[in-house]
Amino acid sequence: MNVQGKRIAITGGFGTLGAAVARVAAAAGAKVAAIDRADAAPPGLADAGIATIGGADIADAAGARKAIDAAADALGGLDALVNIAGAFRWETLADGSLDTWDLLYRVNVRTAAAASQAALPHLRKSSAGRIVNIGANAATKAAAGIGAYAASKAGVMRLTEALAEELKDANITVNAILPSIIDTPPNRADMPNADFGKWVRPEQLAEVILFLVTDEASAVTGALVPVVGRV
């Protein structure tokens, strides 16, 4: 995995997965900017040489442009965008709210579309542009209670495929990974009796994401890559 010198912007960069990808990428020699709606970055990102851009509403087109432009300015350009910003809700349709469907569309699909649109002018200047999105393995077969989440992540998957076709002659690849359950503190708290060893660690996902950023992955585009551990 050679990302030495790659200029990478990560949305949702202050969260568990986003921060893990940022740290792994920076440790491998990439130049990294972490973008997030939250104002305060988690401890250690700046110390690792990671540029932090908080208070960014990337579901808004203007907000996405502002944040992505700031990331490109901080890094001296942009080679890759990793769209990690997202959210999860569990609720049945019978007892839930249609507002949840709107929320998850906005946070999961619209953020990826807006950030990608904002990044394209910068990625077109790169010799090897990359976009990596976060779908969900659960979107391939939805279970009860995750209809809104699965529908929104299916939207991310279709966005990935369509954008890969749109950009296939522009030397920009577009791929998505499809995680199962990620080993995060909130997931452990929600499922305390689960076998955490079967879940996918954020650092394992980071390795797959960053492979898709490398020059070695130049032939891979439009792929939906399951990363499910032993779930």
Image (cartoon, rainbow, N blue to C red):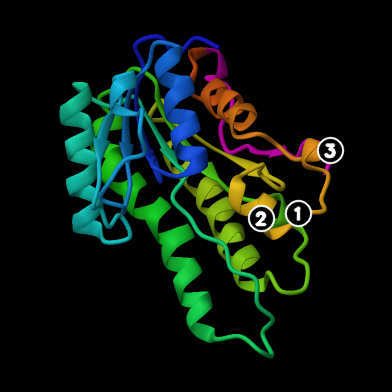
Q: Is residue 127 left or right of residue 95?
A: left
Neighbours of disc 2 within 10 Å: few (<14), some (14-19), many (20+):
few
Visible residue check, residue 217 = yes
Q: Which residue corresponds to mark 3?
A: 230
- Asked if residue 226 lies in the magenta stretch, the reply is yes
Give the distance between the C-alpha atoms of the residues marked 3 and 1, in whole angstroms. 17 Å
- Amino acid type for the residue under numbered disc 1: Pro
Could you say whether the residue bearing mark 3 is in a helix, strand or loop? loop
Relative to 190, residue 100 above or below: below
Q: Which residue corresponds to mark 1?
A: 192
Task: Name the residue located 39 percent from the left edge and 42 percent from the top edge.
Answer: 14
Could you say whether the residue bearing mark 2 is in a helix, strand or loop? helix
- Amino acid type for the residue under numbered disc 2: Ala
Callout 1 touching callout 2 (CB < 8 Å): yes
Q: Which residue corresponds to mark 2?
A: 189
Q: Position of residue 107 (x, y in %)?
A: 43, 62
Task: Name the residue located 48 percent from the left edge and 82 percent from the top edge.
Answer: 99
On-image quarter of the C terminus: top right
- Amino acid type for the residue under numbered disc 3: Arg
Q: Residue furthest bottom?
A: 94
Q: Which region is colored magenta? A: 216-231
